[in-house]
Amino acid sequence: MDRSFVERNRASTERIRKLTGGLTEAQLQQPVGADWTVAVALAHLAFWDRRVQFVLDRTEREGKLSAVELDVIVNDLLLSTWELVPGDQARQLAVETAEALDKRLESFPAGLLEQVNAHNPRWVLRALHRNEHLDEVEQALRKGRS
């Protein structure tokens, strides 16, 4: 399996850290789109990275892919919960979760990793999901400075 996901995931984790490391609480509450804030985007990223960690744990324990399918509606259902997470805690949660998942993916058994990747490549190459939202966060922060 192509292991380029390792460096791409590390780069997206570092991007989270650098982009959000010096943000004030006001900046963390900057709107991102119609319903989200920067903090909500970070809590969202942490949630979905934790979901992948859960799938990896079950897959390794069972010795075969054990996917947990979630309806897309989960983002809407969790929005009010994510809004309760203070910005600095959302930042910490996003960085720590991304770091932990990156390490887990790097050392995950190759055969099982291939099964996970075949089912959903975004579960392995987390940079795809992270960078989508980090692009939105950067755009929102630029607008906030204008």
Image (cartoon, rainbow, N blue to C red):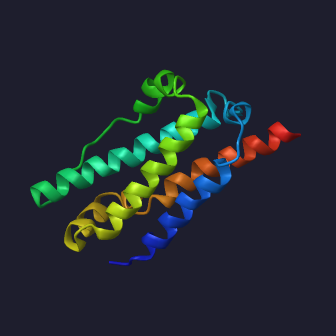
At x 53% / y 37%, what residue is drawn? 90
Q: Is residue 68 left or right of residue 8?
A: left
At x 21% / y 66%, what residue is drawn? 112
Note whether residue 103 is visible. Answer: yes
Q: Position of residue 10 (x, y in %)?
A: 50, 65
Q: How many numbered marks appear?
A: 0
Note whether residue 65 is visible. Answer: no
Residue extending furthest left? 62
Q: Position of residue 133 (x, y in %)?
A: 59, 47
Give the image quarter of residue 46.
Answer: top left
Q: Nearer the viewer, residue 104 or 89?
A: 89
Q: Position of residue 5 (x, y in %)?
A: 44, 70
Q: Nearer the viewer, residue 40 or 18?
A: 18
Q: Quadrant of the C terminus?
A: top right
Up-down: is 100 above or below 90?
Answer: below
At x 67% / y 35%, what residue is drawn? 28
Q: Is residue 144 left or right of residue 135?
A: right
Give the image quarter of residue 38.
Answer: top right
At x 56% / y 33%, what residue is drawn? 40
Q: Nearer the viewer, residue 40 or 24?
A: 24
Q: Position of residue 18 (x, y in %)?
A: 65, 56
